[in-house]
């Protein structure tokens, strides 16, 4: 552990001190002693005090900066958000007057480790697909393609002067782009801090008629996709342009210039090595930063940082305009409010949000529990870790399309390498033995090669929409008729067993009733699952168990199940792999909420919470409140 003394109040930030500590740096106030360093924040104004202390004591300076992926909003936004990582350098990555630690790394690391390059490629692909950037609160349409993209920066940014440029360089950039692309539209991307009014940029109206100032919060990835060329001075977006397949024209001397991936108009003579994109990413994004996983309170890699920021950016985009959900039951309201970033009211107004298949206004978005929900039943008032918001329909209603169907179709078009995350997530779910509710219970002695028949809640929306007219008795009879010699094991739905919902039967056609048994061991031992629309069918598919469907659940009709019920013709157009279905159902469609950090989170974090905790522990009054909830469900004050 190395001690670094600081004289700037910014280092009192809890997140910064925690990341530094995990990185082996103990940040303390006071003057440095022998062998200790002085901490400075980049080349900001406060760094002058640190430089003076270092000069007086002979201590080495460690310069700190936010990592390349920081937060939803810039650091000057209020309320201030903690950073996702730190860059620590004895010089500063944007100081081109001499080689920084990052430059030394890029210049001399062999980059011949196949595992490192493989991890770099995977993380780079994930970052590009996720469209995350340093300040990830991006939304809105991209401009019509075919333009030349110019990247502005904030006036006075230290990286400009220390990167061999000046305010005049931005005028040169515009003139150069116009000269080299005389007939093209020029689009100037303003810095987020300029768009928010925090700091001035280098361009302002009036501009020539062929030049447009673009200050909308469009994702840089979408701007790169429509650009025929990219020009920059020292902006980080030049680095991101490389990741998105561009060879940007660079008029300054940023860290990413000089390695053969940029068109350098002011070369750094000492940089002579040529790197691949994967090598540049490995150095700048994998080896150099100190990434922090706030959910697990540990250092992590860029993949975890990308996923955490992507989850928060998605929640921001979906919630930023607010919701109104007047029909939400009282017990759900605090959980829904937290889940929706606090931007929800329970009166009229804003965008309407309706729970499940309840009546609502035209165009209402529908909300339901996700497929990795909780440890405990929703009917027991246990809050969910996942929810789905569907603006097209609802996943359990096959009579119309849904956002989940769209996710399945999109995932079916992904190449196999783009589904590696789904494969890893499915393995993690199986290894942890997770299901929707993750209830404990005793597993009975089970026969060999049995067929598992999951019971369902009698009036469940998935039964009413996906298997109308089907009952638990009829489900068992159909299984017996289809497999007269088989051993049938019937599992009652846990809500029914708890006495909270209707659907109890005598199960006379079953050979064994697995009362109180947890779902996963029953699925794992089954030769087949016979179901109407139960989620246990999807959980069986994930574990390689054949599934027969007499109804039309969301996972039926894609070529992965034995379909005994009607299949919408629109589903036959796509033939997703199991990994594609998992990607749609567990990654693309739901949103997840971490009850520990109280923020949106990736599905991998939800799996960790369900497998290892910590999770909120419902009080003993929950069961009584749950029964009251059922009794008063139709009473206005409760709803």
Image: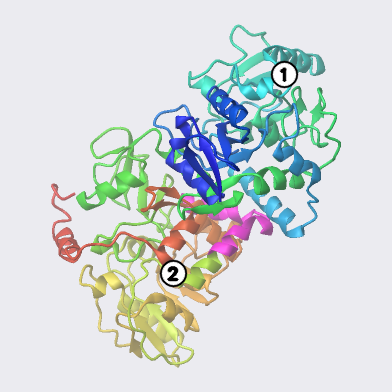
Q: Position of residue 184 (x, y in %)?
A: 74, 18
User: Which residue: 59% across, 27% down?
Assistant: 56
Label 1 – label 2 distance at C-alpha: 55 Å
Q: Nearer the viewer, mark 1 or mark 2?
A: 1
Q: Residue 582 in the image: x percent, y percent? A: 53, 61
Q: Earlier in the sequence, mark 1 or mark 2?
A: 1
Front one among 180 and 493: 180
Q: Is residue 586 above or below residue 294?
A: below
The 10 Å Cα crowd at callout 1, few under 14, some 14 to 19, many 20 or more, is some
Q: Is residue 159 left or right of residue 613?
A: right
Q: Does the segment drawn in magenta span residue 409? A: yes
Q: Position of residue 471 (x, y in %)?
A: 31, 73
Helix, strand or loop for disc 2? loop
* Quarter where residue 54 is shown: top right
Residue 443 makes an appearance in the image: yes
Label 1 element class:
loop
Res 132 visible = no
Which residue is pictured at 42% across the width and 44% down the height? 391
The kind of secondary structure the magenta stretch mainly shows is helix
Foreground pick, 11 / 635: 11
Question: Residue 206 location, x and y as percent?
Answer: 60, 6
**Numbered range of the magenta stretch:** 403-425
Q: Is residue 269 magenta?
A: no
Give the residue at mark 1. 165
């Amino acid at each position: 552990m190395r001690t670094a003394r600081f004289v700037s109040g910014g280092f009192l930030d809890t997140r910064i001190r925690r990341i530094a500590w995990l990185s082996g740096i103990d940040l303390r106030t006071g003057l440095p002693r022998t062998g200790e360093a002085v901490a400075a924040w980049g080349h900001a104004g406060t760094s002058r005090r640190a430089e003076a202390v270092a000069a007086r004591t002979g201590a080495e300076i460690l310069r700190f900066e936010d990592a390349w992926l920081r937060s939803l909003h810039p650091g000057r936004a209020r309320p201030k958000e903690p950073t996702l990582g730190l860059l620590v350098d004895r010089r500063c990555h944007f100081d081109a007057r001499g080689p920084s630690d990052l430059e030394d790394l890029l210049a001399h690391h062999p980059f011949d480790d196949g595992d490192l390059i493989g991890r770099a490629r995977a993380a780079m692909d994930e970052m590009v697909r996720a469209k995350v950037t340093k300040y990830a609160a991006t939304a809105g349409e991209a401009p019509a393609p075919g333009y030349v993209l110019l990247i502005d920066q904030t006036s006075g940014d230290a990286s400009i002067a220390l990167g061999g440029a000046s305010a005049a360089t931005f005028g040169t950039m515009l003139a150069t782009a116009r000269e080299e692309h005389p007939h093209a539209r020029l689009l100037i991307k303003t810095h987020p801090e300029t768009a928010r009014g925090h700091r001035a940029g280098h361009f302002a109206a009036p501009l020539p008629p062929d030049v447009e100032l673009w200050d909308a919060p469009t994702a840089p990835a979408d701007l790169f996709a429509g650009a025929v060329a990219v020009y920059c001075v020292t902006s980080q977006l030049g680095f991101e342009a490389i990741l998105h397949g561009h060879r940007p024209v660079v008029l300054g001397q940023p860290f990413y210039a000089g390695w053969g991936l940029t068109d350098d108009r002011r070369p750094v003579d000492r940089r002579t090595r040529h790197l691949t994109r994967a090598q540049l990413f490995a150095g700048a994004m994998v080896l150099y930063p100190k990434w922090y996983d706030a959910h697990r309170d540990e250092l992590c890699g860029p993949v975890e940082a990308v996923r955490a920021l992507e989850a928060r950016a998605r929640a921001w985009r979906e919630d930023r305009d607010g919701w109104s959900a007047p029909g939400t039951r009282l017990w759900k309201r605090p959980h829904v409010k937290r889940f929706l970033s606090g931007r929800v009211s329970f009166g009229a107004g804003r965008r309407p949000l309706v729970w499940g298949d309840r009546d609502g206004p035209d165009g209402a978005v529908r909300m339901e529990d996700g497929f990795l929900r909780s440890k405990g039943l929703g009917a027991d008032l246990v809050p969910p870790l996942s929810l789905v918001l569907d603006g097209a329909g609802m996943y359990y209603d096959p009579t119309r399309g849904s956002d989940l169907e769209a996710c399945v179709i999109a995932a079916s078009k992904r190449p196999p390498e783009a589904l590696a995350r789904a494969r890893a997530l499915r393995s993690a779910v199986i290894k942890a033995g997770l299901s929707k509710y993750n209830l404990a219970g005793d597993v009975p002695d089970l026969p060999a090669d049995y067929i598992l028949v999951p019971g369902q809640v009698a009036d469940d929306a998935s039964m009413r929409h996906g298997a109308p007219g089907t009952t638990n008795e009829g489900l068992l009879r159909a299984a017996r008729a289809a497999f007269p010699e088989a051993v049938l094991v019937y599992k009652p739905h846990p809500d029914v067993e708890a006495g909270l919902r209707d659907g109890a039967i005598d199960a006379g056609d079953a050979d064994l009733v697995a009362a109180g048994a947890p779902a996963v061991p029953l699925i794992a031992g089954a030769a087949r699952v016979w179901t109407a629309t139960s989620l246990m069918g999807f959980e069986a598919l994930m574990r390689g168990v054949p599934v027969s469907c007499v109804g039309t659940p969301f996972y039926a009709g894609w070529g992965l199940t034995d379909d005994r019920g009607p299949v919408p013709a629109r589903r036959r157009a796509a033939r997703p792999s199991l990994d594609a279905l998992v990607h749609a159902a567990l990654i693309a469609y739901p949103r997840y909420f971490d009850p520990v950090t109280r923020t949106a989170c990736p599905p991998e974090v939800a799996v960790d919470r369900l497998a290892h905790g910590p999770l909120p522990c419902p009080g003993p009054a929950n069961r009584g409140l749950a029964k009251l909830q059922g009794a008063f469900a139709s009473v206005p004050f409760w709803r």
